[in-house]
Image (cartoon, helix red, strand yellow):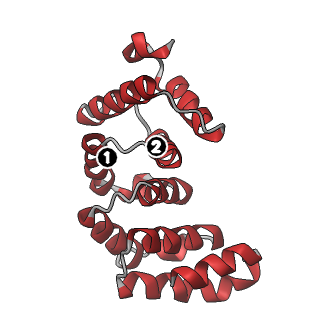
Amino acid sequence: RFTRSIAEIDAMALTSAVYACGLVSFFDRPFFEAVSAFLHDALRHPGAGLESQQVSNIVYTFGKLGFCPDKTLHAVVKFAIADLWRFKAQELDNLTYGFALLKFRNDSYLARLQQHLVDDGRVDKLDAQSLVSMAYSHALLGYTNAVALRAIGDRAIPKLHHFKAEEFSIMVFSL
């Protein structure tokens, strides 16, 4: 129903529908191709009304469903690295984890993310869940930047008492 007039749909309604598809593991190729085109076009036109949460939720859903629109993901990278501070911690997790699930390794994004986490001090603001998510995404992507992983690990140590058993296992595996 959305694919015929997707450009006319409110961005919030569209991203909510996309996210819901991910939650129930529903994939319809024509719909997701239209969403990819919508996202790509919106990112090329600043002021199109897409917020960082919407972008990260779409990429996260793409990752959950295994849908890897390369051209759109490159546009997302460009959008993201322009200002990683616009993303809240959970949004940054969703974005990076979506890339990781797709095995979409973009070294420009990962280098900027590492700089953002370490040099810009973002790693200090991550909670236990976000630290685990970042470490796991790095592992899935095979990105073994010692500086970033050391920073994540160092920040995780004082928060170990907040980790669930599964999160602790994932952190150990990832580092």
Front residue of this view, candidates 154 and 121: 154
* Residue at the image point whose x is 35% and y is 78% from the top: 119
Figure check: 82 above or below 41: below
Graded by Cα atoms within 10 Å as few (under 14), some (14 to 19) or many (20 or more), the crowding at tag 1 reads some
Q: How many circles with numbers are drawn on the protein?
A: 2
Asked if residue 118 lies left or right of residue 171, the reply is: left
Local SS, label 1 = helix
* Residue at the image point whose x is 45% and y is 74% from the top: 139
Sequence-wise first label, 1 or 2? 2
Q: Can residue 5 be seen?
A: no
* Residue at the image point whose x is 24% and y is 64% from the top: 108
* Residue at the image point whose x is 52% and y is 71% from the top: 136
Q: Which residue is mark 1?
A: 73
In the image, residue 77 lies at what x, y percent?
A: 29, 52
Local SS, label 2 = helix
In the image, residue 5 lies at what x, y percent?
A: 40, 11
Q: Which residue is mark 2?
A: 62
In the image, residue 88 lies at what x, y percent?
A: 51, 55
